[in-house]
Image (tube, grey):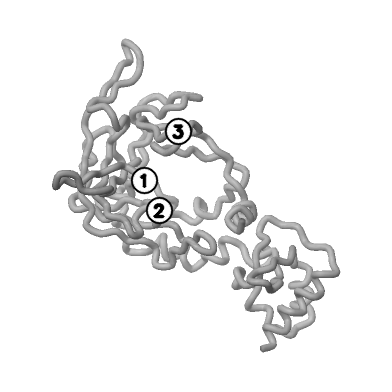
Amino acid sequence: MIQTLLICLLVIQASDCTFAKCDSCMLLRECPEALNLASDTNPAVKQRLQEAVCGIKTVDGKRHPMICCSNFITVSERFAETCIDIETHDNVALLPEKCGGINGDRIIGGLYANLYEFPWMALISFVTGIHNGERQTQFQCGGTIINSRYILTAAHCVESKVIAGVRVGEFNINTPEDCQGEYPHYICESHIQDIAVVKSIPHEDFKILPNVQNDIALLRLKVPIDFSFKNVAPVCLPIFNELRNISLDGKRATVAGWGITEFNRASSVLRKVDLPIKTENECRQYYDR
């Protein structure tokens, strides 16, 4: 009850003040570290909450305060327990010792990826129908090789879908042999691996409405990937604290896949593009719309 009254007070007072500016502006109820303080009657805590109010948002006809969550927590503090657990967890041993090897010269500024540039990329095929007693399949999602038995992908790619299998080592979906380069540096690759999926594991809290949340899933393969070939390798994961706590706001990331291009057509060849990484606040504003 006290917490509810204080939240209401925040809404009223915020209506007559200048809002704080930050990159972590979110609903108070979405910031547990600040929400826990809403029941604290200490005047200094109350003042701290008021100064962190960054806006008012109407949800279901009711006005709710928005707050600069970063004023109350840091990434390393919020995930402190997880950080320790990840580095010392027994399951770390399940990750491959070698990962992320990129072979071949990169194509600087090119639309297409290098033949061996992203060996951790995977294609996920789905059953789209039955024709003459045979399953019709189509590649509709991508994934990332985590280790020899697991593929990381999006939860919306597995939820309520019939998965036909996973393909690794692919480059051009339409050709049995993929070649690239110019003489004398002309290389070809023809080995792909199609593997059945025995289990799909979407995040237990995956939601689409009202906002997309926890859109992540794992696929367990029926047989392990053979990493003896040059065109397949697991991606390197940021296990250590210093890697996971780096701020990526404003930096650039490379996106790779066979997805829809600017011409609204799916690409049969693996492509790549560098994109700016948005701040958490920018992402929240986008998804809230």
Residue 195 screen position, x and y as percent: 21, 46
Q: Which residue is mark 2?
A: 154
Q: Looking at the image, is mark 1 or mark 3 nearer the viewer?
A: 1
Label 1–label 2 contact, CB within 8 A: yes
Q: Is residue 261 left or right of residue 161?
A: right
The part of the image, by quadrant, that contains residue 234 is top left
Q: Amino acid at mark 2?
A: Ala
Residue 126 image offset from top left, x and y in percent = 28, 48
User: Of callouts 1 and 2, which one flags the residue occurring earlier in the amino acid sequence?
Assistant: 1
Left or right: residue 74 versus residue 19 is left
Residue furthest to the right in view is 16
Quarter of the image with the C terminus is: bottom right
Task: List the single residue furthest toward the front.
Answer: 132
Q: Which residue is mark 3?
A: 272
Tag 2 secondary structure: loop
Look at the numbered disc 1 and give the secondary structure of its residue: strand
Q: Amino acid at mark 3?
A: Lys
Within-10-Å neighbours for mark 3: few <14, some 14–19, many 20+: many
Picture disc at residue 141: 1
Dot 1 or dot 3, earlier in sequence: 1
The x and y percentages for residue 265 are: 43, 34
Quadrant position of the N terminus in the picture: bottom right
Who's the residue at 33% across and 37% down the image? 119
Whole-number angstrom distance, CA of label 1 to CA of label 2: 8 Å
